[in-house]
Amino acid sequence: MTVLLGFAFLAALLTHIGCSNPRRVPESSSTRRYNRIQHGQCTYTFILPEQDGNCRESTTEQYNTNALQRDAPHMEQDFSTQKLQRLEHVMENYTQWLQKLENYIVENMKSEMAQMQQNAVQNHTATMLEIGTSLLSQTAEQTRKLTDVETQVLNQTSRLEIQLLENSLSTYKLEKQLLQQTHEIFKIHEKNSLLEHKILEMEERHKEELDTLKEEKENLQSLVSRQTYIIQELERQLTKATTNNSILQKQQLELMDTVHSLVNMCSKEGVVLKNPKREDDKPFRDCADAYQAGFNKSGVYTIYVNNISEPKKVFCNMDILGGGWTVIQHREDGSLDFQKNWKEYKMGFGSPSGEYWLGNEFIFVITTSQRHYSLRIELTDWEGSRAYSQYDRFYIGSEKQNYRLYLKGHSGTAGKQSSLILHGADFSTKDADNDNCMCKCALMLTGGWWFDACGPSNLNGMFYSAGQHHGKINGIKWHYFKGPSYSLRSTTMMIRPLDF
């Protein structure tokens, strides 16, 4: 019986040792019986003792209550009691061994469970570490990115703050400028108010002056009308007087011829006269004749021009460069208006002792029908400086040729170049536009002159007094002496024969 229990214990122990890999016990055709106990994941299998058919069945009640002892031999009661005691003792031992085995199994199970839990914890910890490492790396990357973004944001913020500061400064400057401009506008508005007030006062004064001027104009118009009538009467009387003077001059010439013939007759017959007429009394063609006749004082002389019946009074300059100069133009004080028409420039105007123009027709006849002439122009500015321009050959064409100017050989101190057109130019007046400009130079520059294309000279322009002679394009101009807009103080144009 003891052997059987030991065998069962060993079988259970072996079965426990292989619980980690349980195997199903095969069914056999033997009558061996098994008892399986499930404990957690392990199954314990006990092999029960075989039932022998020769065993006797006890009729005793105690043998019926313990089926494990059926195969034991029938013994006596004392012996059976001892056996039972021993068996109980053995059973107690086995029970202790079973408890120890169970404790051992539990302890092994605990260590294995602890090992498994430790492994699971380690695996979980490793996984968590990997996950943590990954999260840390991702967190570090995100932190770096966030740091970059933060840096960019800080830089952008700094730039925006700088721009805001600059904008604030610009706004401050603009506000300051706006305030200054507003202040200036206010000042300008005040000045405009004062100017408007002054303009209103000036308009009132101007209106009063206009009314006064209108009255004066009406008075002057009536006065001019009366003076025009008087001038017309004087012209008629002058024409009559000129006619009478011409008749008297002709009579004088006839008397002079008669006297000359009488003198000649008397000289042939030996008669001596007390006051005989000299050769000096013969008529002069120009001032050169007068000078050569012994008249060497500057002044007004009477000359007789070829092909013109009437004598002409001229001013003779007997002082400059040997004398004998016939003055054809003179300006000195602005007392004479040189804004004349074609006919007036043709016949001449003014007084030989003051400002005058000899006349284009007389200049034409003198310079073409008698002998060759040179031209000298004397100029004086408002600072007292004097200069001259001289031309070796000078003459003008006929009226049909528009009194065209011809010059040769320039010299003098009034500029290195000639201010008169050397290649020739036609004479123009306010009513006869013969220049080479579409602008009508005689109207724009005033006076009559050889303008060409409103050229560099005009000695018959408007006279301007001292202080007003600058910046005047229509004044008395000689470009290469004082410039294009300087009006001269005095001018003199005079001619003399080349063979003088």
Image (tube, rainbow, N blue to C red):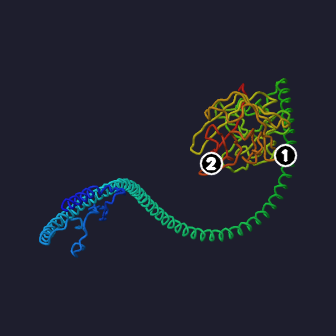
Q: Nearer the viewer, residue 151 or 66?
A: 66
The type of residue carrying mark 1 is: Thr
Figure check: 1 above or below 140: below
Figure check: 19 above or below 247: below
Asked if residue 46 can be seen in this view, the reply is no
Label 1: few (<14), some (14–19) or many (≥20) C-alpha neighbours in 10 Å: some
Label 2: few (<14), some (14–19) or many (≥20) C-alpha neighbours in 10 Å: few
Quadrant in which residue 223 is drawn: bottom right
Please state if 463 lies on the left or on the right of 41 as rendered. Answer: right
Quadrant where the image shows the N terminus: bottom left
Q: Earlier in the sequence, mark 2 or mark 1?
A: 1
**Picture residue at 83% right of the left edge, 33% below the top:** 306
Q: Nearer the viewer, residue 347 or 109?
A: 109
The label shown at residue 242 is 1
Please state if 147 lies on the left or on the right of 199 as rendered. Answer: left
Q: Percent x, y for residue 352?
A: 73, 43
Asked if residue 472 can be seen in this view, the reply is yes
What is the CA distance from the residue labelled 2 to the residue labelled 1? Answer: 43 Å
- For the residue labelled by badge 1, is the local secondary structure a helix, a strand or a loop? helix
Q: Percent x, y for residue 325?
A: 70, 34
The type of residue carrying mark 2 is: Gly
The label shown at residue 471 is 2
Quadrant in which residue 204 is drawn: bottom right
Quadrant where the image shows the C terminus: top right
For the residues carrying marks 2 and 1, which lies nearer the camera in this image? 2
Q: Percent x, y for residue 290?
A: 73, 33
Q: Nearer the viewer, residue 298 or 159?
A: 159
Figure check: 45 above or below 406: below
**Picture residue at 64% right of the left edge, 42% below the top:** 484
